[in-house]
Image (cartoon, rainbow, N blue to C red):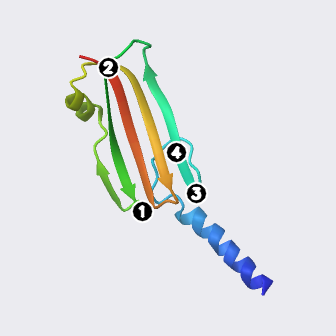
Amino acid sequence: MSQFKNLHFRLLILSFLLFGTCASPGFGPRGLIFTKTKIGMYGTGETSKRRVTSCAHSILGFISYGDASFEFLKSRSKIQTVTETNWTTFAVLGLYANLCVEISGNE
């Protein structure tokens, strides 16, 4: 009976290793079960009047949607000069993942 449980445990670990990153934010540190990180990509230290965020999403690594491009963010917020950029990643069990880009700046 213990041999049977040991086999189940090994199969569970193997499935996490093979399929645990099906949906992935694409970069940065990744957790096997859960990922939530915020990475500062750029900053000038200047104060900013506007801030906007947009995300791209992935489901099982099969379906992806969203627009987190600088052009989209700048057009949505009327930001002309970017003073800060942060990227946030989130993933759960390789089932769902997203990458959000936040920019701050001035007109």
Quadrant in the picture for the N terminus? bottom right
If the image is split into quadrants, where does the C terminus sit?
top left
Point out residue 50 in the picture as x, y percentages from the top left corner: 30, 22
What kind of element bears circle 4?
Answer: strand
Residue position marked by numbered label 1 in the rendering: 60
Q: Tell me if 92 is positioned left or right of 11 in this view.
A: left
Residue situated furthest right in the rendering: 2
Callout in the foreground (3, 1): 3
**Disc nearest the viewer among 4 and 1:** 4
Of mark 3 and mark 1, the one earlier in the sequence is: 3
Residue type at tag 1 = Leu
Q: CA distance from mark 4 to mark 1?
A: 17 Å
Check disc 4 and report the residue beneath it. 36
| Disc 3 residue crowd, few under 14, some 14–19, many 20+, Cα 10 Å | few
Mark before the other along the chain sequence, 4 or 2: 4
Q: Which residue is mark 3?
A: 33
How far apart marks 3 and 1 lie (CA) works out to 14 Å
The residue under label 2 is: 105
